[in-house]
Amino acid sequence: MGTVVVVGAGIIGSSVAYHCARLGAEVTLVDKTLPGAGATGDSFAWIGASDRVPGPGGPLRAAALREYRRLADEVPDVRVRWTGSLSWGGAEPENVREAGARLLDADAVAALEPHLRHPPERAVHLAGDGVVDPVATTDALVAAAVAQGARTLFATVVTGLRRAGGQVVGVETTAGAVGADAVVLAAGADVAVLCAPLGVAVPVASSPALLLRLTGPPDLVRTVIATPEVEIRAGRDGELLAPLAHTGETTATALARSAERARGRIAAMFHSGEDVRLRSVRVGARPMPVGGHPLIGPLVPGAYLAVMHSGVTLAPVAGRLVAEEVVHGVEAPELHGCRPG
Ligand SMILES: Cc1cc2nc3c(=O)[nH]c(=O)nc-3n(C[C@H](O)[C@H](O)[C@H](O)COP(=O)(O)OP(=O)(O)OC[C@H]3O[C@@H](n4cnc5c(N)ncnc54)[C@H](O)[C@@H]3O)c2cc1C
């Protein structure tokens, strides 16, 4: 494929654009706002080897951490902090053994997280897990794509897919039409709307989830901590990040109340936790394929779908495999379980 349009500059579209450009394709990356402004910007961005939804995405998960190392070598501005993760109380991953996990006792947990008030008697430690700044990573991928010759069209909405003889041949945008041999649809939660005119159902929902940004004492959390009640890690500049499930709140007051309850749970977990303060609450629109498994592959001739949950973890491996399929026509066995339809 000579020319490729990628719709969506989240972490998935940016990774696809970079990998396609690296293979020599003429790439145009289009986004209605700016890179990382979708679900990516509101992500907890824990990159982990484990999977709580085993199934078709397994081979991608298995390669995810290795592919991050490869990508960080190729694109130095992709920076992973290899913090490791600690899970307990029912939040342990199911595929613990394959993921290379170790069981730790309370002393070992306390050595890793000295500020915990009550270290658990038993926790699963995944030393190889890490975290990224998802927007900085997306920006780095866009810059690397541009360095390989890709063109970007930001603040540009894709309003439709151009078709000729049953084949998708490009996109209509608010900045004009762009022709392409292949269009990669990486528009996250908006992908179903974008694909509706094709007459193909794309079973992807927009699934809200909250991201809390907090301040607290320096060095309060060192790893990624996951329990059924709290997930938390350190972010940039001493900030703490904590994702929270959306439980049907529909008013700002109800969202604020849920966030405050979560802050209270976090405060209770740590010595000096009373100094933890809520800085902001965001609601991210996660692209969520029905069944939870990635949807990656040809949709109709000329159009290729790339949408998944845990997209921050999967971006390097998914981007590389999509590019090899789209640009070189090399089918990836790892993607066989992920095909649309
Ligand atoms: C609170 C929260 C916590 C999370 N935690 C994790 C985690 O710990 N680990 C992990 O791996 N994943 C996590 N995720 C999920 C992860 O963030 C997403 O899977 C990933 O960011 C999806 O990336 P994407 O590029 O597919 O979508 P997006 O980032 O949503 O990007 C889609 C892009 O398409 C653009 N677009 C849409 N329609 C159009 C159009 N018509 N024209 C032009 N552009 C368009 C949008 O502007 C957007 O930039 C979390 C998500 C949330 C919200």
Image: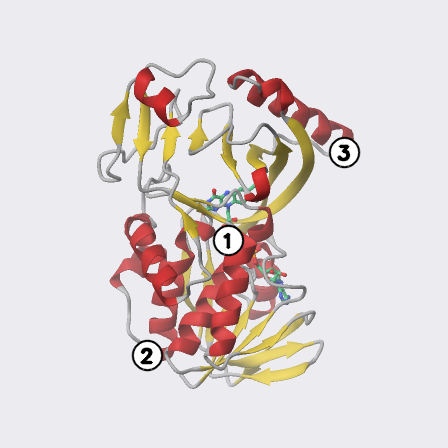
At label 3, the amino acid type is Ala
Q: Which residue is mark 2?
A: 328
> Where residue 37 appears, x then y in whole percent?
63, 56
Q: Quadrant of the C terminus?
A: bottom left
Q: Is residue 136 above or below residue 174?
A: above
> Where residue 12 appears, x then y in whole percent?
48, 60
Give the foreground label among 1 and 2.
Answer: 2
Q: Nearer the viewer, residue 302 or 156?
A: 156
Q: Secondary structure at mark 2?
A: helix
Q: Secondary structure at mark 3?
A: helix
At label 1, the amino acid type is Pro
Q: Is residue 137 above or below residue 152?
A: above
Q: Residues within 10 Å of mark 2 (few under 14, many from 20)?
A: some
Q: Residues within 10 Å of mark 3 (few under 14, many from 20)?
A: few
N-terminal label among 1 and 2: 1
Q: Who's the residue at 45% across and 65% down the image?
A: 15
> Where residue 184 appears, x then y in whole percent?
49, 70
Q: Which residue is mark 3?
A: 252
Q: Which residue is mark 1?
A: 203
Q: Who's the residue at 39% across and 76% down the image?
A: 22
In whole angstroms, how far apart are the C-alphas of marks 1 and 3?
29 Å
At label 2, the amino acid type is His
Note whether ligand 1 is within 8 Å of mark 3: no
Q: Nearer the viewer, residue 83 or 286?
A: 83
Q: Quadrant of the N terminus?
A: bottom left
In whole angstroms, how far apart are the C-alphas of marks 3 and 2?
48 Å
Can see residue 241?
Answer: yes
Image quadrant where residue 173 sits: bottom right
Q: Is residue 118 above or below residue 35?
A: above
